[in-house]
Amino acid sequence: MKRVLLIVFVIFFSACSDSEKVPAGILSTSRMEALLQDLYLADALVNDRKNRDTLITEPDLLKRSYYEQLFKLHNTNREAFLKSYRYYVQHPVLFKKITDSLASSSQRSADAIANDTTFKP
């Protein structure tokens, strides 16, 4: 009976452990959020430039160039980003935390622009 209680006790406390701690080699949730935000902005910039500038014939090359610059800016590389991205996709609770934060940040920016009387699109 003591052995069963010990097993239940260990399982209970392992389930209650810090689920937000990520393993070594994985970008933290805050770093991943900041990097994803910049990557999404780079995508939007490339799409906007592609629509405005007919001389851009290789938007994927431009996007790749921006991505590499952003990886350097965030002190990481493509491989570390992809490894981290795969990790977060496999851990939906953590990934939801990141995406919810990104959505909230985007909404705050949109609200600030909407309330700015000096902003003229």
Image (cartoon, rainbow, N blue to C red):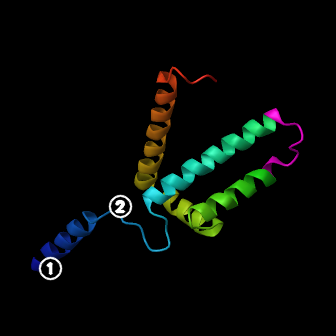
Check disc 1 and give the amino acid type.
Arg
Q: Residue at x 74, y 56 (%)?
A: 64
Q: Position of residue 4 (x, y in %)?
A: 16, 75
Most distant residue in the top direction:
117
Q: Quadrant of residue 11?
A: bottom left
- Which mark, by number, is residue 3? 1
Magenta stretch holds residue 95: no
Residue lying at 35% horizontally and 61% vertically, measured from the top left: 20
Residue 53: horizontal and vertical position, in percent? 84, 36
Residue 85: quarter of image: bottom right
Tell me if residue 91 can be seen: no
Q: Is residue 72 above or below residue 4?
A: above
The amino acid on which the numbered mark 2 sits, given as a three-letter code, is Glu
Instruction: Give the spatial CA distance, label 2 vs label 1.
Output: 30 Å
Q: Quick check: 107 left or right of 41?
A: left
Q: Quadrant of the N terminus?
A: bottom left
Q: Residue at x 80, y 34 (%)?
A: 51
Give, as a single range, the part of the protein colored magenta: 52-60
Q: Which residue carries the number 2 mark?
A: 20
Numbered disc 2: secondary structure: loop
Q: Residues within 10 Å of mark 2 (few under 14, many from 20)?
A: few
